[in-house]
Image (cartoon, rainbow, N blue to C red):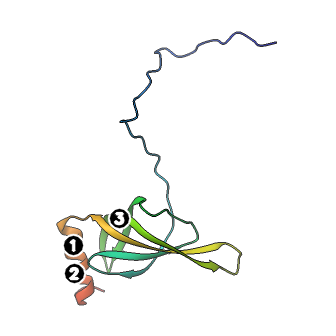
Amino acid sequence: MAEAFLERRRVPRVSLSEEHRVGVPLTVTVRLVDISTGGVLLASTQRMSVGQRARLHTTLGAEPFNVEVEVRRVNDIGAEANGKGRYRMGAVFSGIDETARRSIQHFLSGDIQ
């Protein structure tokens, strides 16, 4: 027998239209394999999807490097010894500020290590 539902909210819910987007931040640990002025090659045991956007946080030398990336390709390169899959993901910088651009240029020119 179903019990009567007791509403406990103080304010009623409001439905949102499809134009409102809500995201849940997830953390994916990656290894930075390669970097250029246009993007990165990442390796991970977790697969990301083509078109997926993410925020990459790392350091180049001693300088912090935070940039938006968009995954453009994903390759499954097989399993590691622990049986987990490994993926290589090529991503382009989709939102890069002048500070991050300078950090890459200094890093690639050998000015920072």
Pair 3/1: label in front: 3
Quadrant showing the N terminus: top right
Q: Is mark 3 on a helix, strand or loop?
A: strand
Q: Is residue 13 above or below residue 20?
A: above
In the rendering, at what x and y percent does residue 43 appear? Answer: 50, 76
Pair 2/3: label in front: 3
Q: Is residue 17 above or below residue 47?
A: above
Q: What's the amino acid at mark 1?
A: Arg
Residue drawn at x 30%, y 81% as measured from the top left = 36
Q: Which mark is residue 101?
A: 1
Q: Is mark 2 on a helix, strand or loop?
A: helix
Residue drawn at x 35%, y 73% as measured from the top left = 59
In the rendering, at what x and y percent does residue 29 appear? Answer: 51, 67
Q: Tell me how many marks there are.
A: 3
Outermost residue, bottom direction?
110
In the rendering, at what x and y percent does residue 77 appear? Answer: 58, 80
Residue annotated with mark 3: 69
| Quarter assignment of residue 94 | bottom left
Q: Are marks 1 and 2 in contact (CB under 8 Å)?
A: yes
Q: What's the amino acid at mark 3?
A: Val
Q: How crowded is mark 2: few (under 14 residues within 10 Å), some or many (20 or more)?
A: some
Q: Is mark 1 on a helix, strand or loop?
A: helix
* Residue situated in front as seen by the camera: 90 or 103: 90
Q: Residues within 10 Å of mark 3 (few under 14, many from 20)?
A: many
Residue drawn at x 24%, y 65% as measured from the top left = 96
Horizontal arrangement in the rendering, residue 40 relative to residue 101 (left or right): right
Horizontal arrangement in the rendering, residue 104 relative to residue 22 (left or right): left
Residue annotated with mark 2: 105
| Quarter assignment of residue 72 | bottom left
